[in-house]
Amino acid sequence: MYKLGQGYWTRVISATAGGVIAMLGGWWLHDIFETVDLGVNPIYLSWGIGGLFVALCCPLIYWLIARHPSAVDFLVATETEMKKVSWPTRREVSGSTIIVIFTSALIAGFCFVFDQAFFFLFVQLRVLEPGT
């Protein structure tokens, strides 16, 4: 294994995500081939193709996560950089969320007022009818 012990959590999460994607791809292929009739029982065909897809993806995921030097170096560097991040506190996130919601409401109100003003102006100029 290339750089054993480095980037543990990044590798675990990446392998889990890759496994989920492989399983969803296998499930998708299973659903596609469930109705195909090639002279073989569709259950065997759909499960065989779906399972084969997952079985072929697993070594690829292992190679990318554990053996491929540039991919592993990227994952190790990612974990190193994530440790340097200054994560906000719960209070800072709550405050920022309130500010974003307030600002969004303020902009929506501003747009509503100008929309109504332009609508009134265009009705007075007989460009629009009052019922539209």
Image: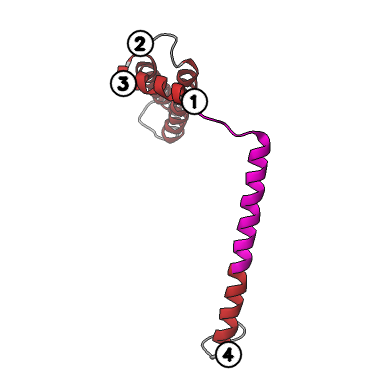
Mark closest to the chain's N terminus, 1 or 3: 3
- Find the magenta span and give its range: 83-110
Looking at numbered disc 1 in the image, what kind of residue is underneath it? Answer: Lys
CA–CA distance between discs 3 and 4? Answer: 67 Å
Q: Nearer the viewer, residue 129 or 98?
A: 98
Mark closest to the chain's N terminus, 2 or 4: 2
- Residue 93 among those drawn in magenta: yes
Label 3: how many Cα within 10 Å (few below 14, some 14–19, many 20+): few
Q: Is residue 111 left or right of residue 45?
A: right
Residue on which the image places disc 2: 2
Q: In the structure shown, which secondary structural element does the residue marked by tag 3 occupy?
A: helix
Q: Nearer the viewer, residue 123 or 131?
A: 123
- Residue 34 in picture, x, y percent from top left: 45, 32
Name the residue rendered at 35%, 16% in the picture: 63
Looking at numbered disc 3 in the image, what kind of residue is underneath it? Answer: Ser
Q: In the structure shown, which secondary structural element does the residue marked by tag 2 occupy?
A: loop
Residue on which the image places disc 3: 70
Residue on which the image places disc 1: 84
Mark closest to the chain's N terminus, 3 or 4: 3
Mark closest to the chain's N terminus, 2 or 1: 2
Please, is residue 55 above or below residue 37 in the view?
above
Q: Is residue 92 left or right of residue 47?
A: right
Looking at numbered disc 2 in the image, what kind of residue is underneath it? Answer: Tyr
CA–CA distance between discs 2 and 4? Answer: 74 Å
- Residue 47 in picture, x, y percent from top left: 45, 24
CA–CA distance between discs 2 and 1? Answer: 23 Å
Residue on which the image places disc 4: 124
